[in-house]
């Protein structure tokens, strides 16, 4: 995903914490449209509601780690 390094630099430079989520959506070769029985992307910039619900626990953990510094 282009720009994620710039986003990380700006975020951490301003004192924030940055979580690169690329690995949640893409393999080394591509970003799959379907994982298991779940449609991942709604369009080129948005995941489906079902995918977001499935990823919510993972994202919650990443947010908790960012907030606590873990």
Image (tube, helix red, strand yellow):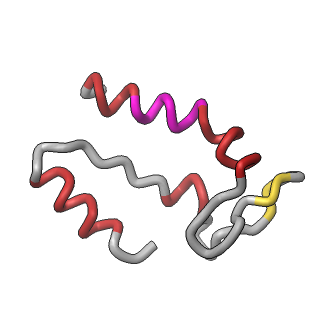
Q: Where does the C terminus fall, quadrant-wise?
A: top left
Q: Residue at x 60, y 59 (%)?
A: 25
Q: Where does the N terminus fall, quadrant-wise?
A: bottom left
Q: Residue at x 70, y 39 (%)?
A: 54
State whether the magenta stretch is mostly helix, strand or loop.
helix
Above or below — where is 25 with respect to 58?
Answer: below
Nearest the eye: 27 or 16: 16
Residue 60 inside the magenta-drawn segment: yes
Above or below — where is 29 with respect to 60?
Answer: below
Instruction: Please provide percent x and percent y for residue 40.
Output: 73, 59
Residue 8 inside the magenta-drawn segment: no
Above or below — where is 2 with respect to 8?
Answer: below
Asked which quadrant contains residue 62, the reply is top left
Asked which quadrant contains residue 46, the reply is bottom right
Q: Residue at x 17, y 60 (%)?
A: 10
What are the residue bounds of the magenta stretch? 57-63
Would residue 20 be found to the left or right of residue 18 on screen? right
Most extreme residue toward the right is 37
Nearest the eye: 25 or 44: 44
């Amino acid at each position: 995903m282009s720009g994620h390094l710039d986003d990380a630099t700006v975020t951490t430079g301003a004192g924030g914490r940055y979580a690169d989520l690329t690995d949640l959506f893409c393999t080394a070769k591509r970003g799959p449209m379907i994982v298991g029985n779940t449609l991942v992307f709604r369009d080129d910039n948005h995941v489906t509601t079902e995918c977001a619900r499935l990823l919510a626990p993972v994202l919650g953990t990443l947010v908790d780690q960012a907030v606590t510094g873990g």
